[in-house]
Structure formats: structure tokens, C-alpha cells
Amino acid sequence: MRNVILIGFMGSGKTTVGFRLSYRLRRTVIDTDKEIEREEQRSISDIFATDGEAYFRDRETLCLQKLLGSTGSQIISVGGGLPLRQENRELLHELGQVFYLSASAETIYERVKYDTTRPLLQGDDPMGRIRTLLAERDSCYREAADVVIDVNGKGFEQILCEIERAVV
Ligand code: S3P
């Protein structure tokens, strides 16, 4: 069995979908952000503040390389910026079947507007930031994906059914 990998912008639902999918498919779930936080014994915000984004990005690549050595039947949800590196997109492809949870800037804003844990969205104009980053990233997500799931206006049940139907 291949891994099922969830990619997408912050707030697109990767973590929640990953947990629910793990119940339905009876597979373990791994979240790259949580793996990095566990290994580093500190939060993503602390890592960004102390060592900077470039350090965090290197940790993401290392995390994927480690996952290549583990069993291939898991659900893996990855941080929103991870697919931006070409090397990471190749690693994702090797690791399993990649699902892009595609959400509009409006959907994302509604989900993250009170969030303080995502360093890239703190600031005066989170909506503007979301629009800019999403425009920059969408093509990378699509390039990395085997399957694109439009999550706008859909409940988790529907999203899970669409993923389950597409899992090979
Ligand atoms: C990031 C997304 C976050 C986390 C970090 C950077 C990004 O993960 O990795 O804050 O660059 O989009 P989520 O997508 O799980 O929020």
C-alpha cells in the first residue's frame, strides 16, 4: 500500500482530514510539523524566531528523507510550505499518492483568522498575505499533486469520501 499524502495551504484542513482519514482507512497518521516540533522539542514559532525559515525548510526536507525509510501505508500531512522546494516535490512523489486540498483565500482566511501559531500569517494584513502566498504557491501544489480535491464549501464527510474514492 502506498502512503496517502495531504498537501495544501495553511488552514486547508490537512491535519483534520489526516486524522479522520486515519480512522477510516485504519492507517497511522504523521504530520511533518508535529514530527519537527517533537524532534526539536520546540514550537514552529520558536524555530522560525530563533533559527529562521531557511532552517525550518531544511528540517522539512530531512523529515521527508526519514519518512522514505519507514513503512509505506501511512497518512502523511505536510506543512503548507513544504511542496515549494523542487526536491521536496520529488520526495513526495516517491513517498506516495499526493492529494492537494485546494481552498480559496476566503475559505482559508475564515479558518485561520484567530490563529497565532503560524508565523507567516501574523501581521497587519493576513488576508493580503494569504492571497499573495496562495497565488505564488498554487502552481507548486498542482505540480506536486496526483489528485486535486476542491474543499471550498464542503464538509469533512464529503472531502473524506472524495479522497477515499481516489485512493489507489
Ligand atoms: C507553513 C505552514 C505551517 C507550518 C509553518 C509554515 C507555510 O503548516 O509548516 O508555519 O509555509 O505554509 P500548516 O500548513 O500545517 O499550517
Image: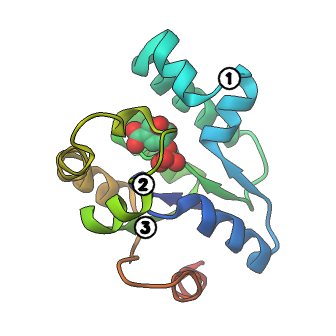
Q: Do the residues labelled 3 and 1 touch (CB within 8 Å)?
A: no
Is residue 24 shown above or below 111? below
Q: How crowded is mark 1: few (under 14 residues within 10 Å), some or many (20 or more)?
A: few
Q: Position of residue 133 (x, y in %)?
A: 24, 45
Q: Name the residue under label 1.
A: 42
Label 1, secondary structure: give it.
Answer: loop
Kindly report the distance in space between the C-alpha atoms of the residues bearing marks 3 and 1.
27 Å
Image quarter of the C terminus: bottom right
Please state which of the two labelled residues, at mark 3 or mark 2, is closer to the viewer.
2
**How many numbered dots are placed on residues in this image?**
3
Q: Residue at x 62, y 33 (%)?
A: 63
Which residue corresponds to mark 3? 101
Residue under pointer 2:
112
The answer to whether the residues at label 1 and label 2 have Cβ atoms under 8 Å apart is no
The CB of the residue at mark 2 lies under 8 Å from ligand 1: yes
User: What's under tag 3, amino acid-wise?
Assistant: Leu
Note whether residue 101 is visible: yes
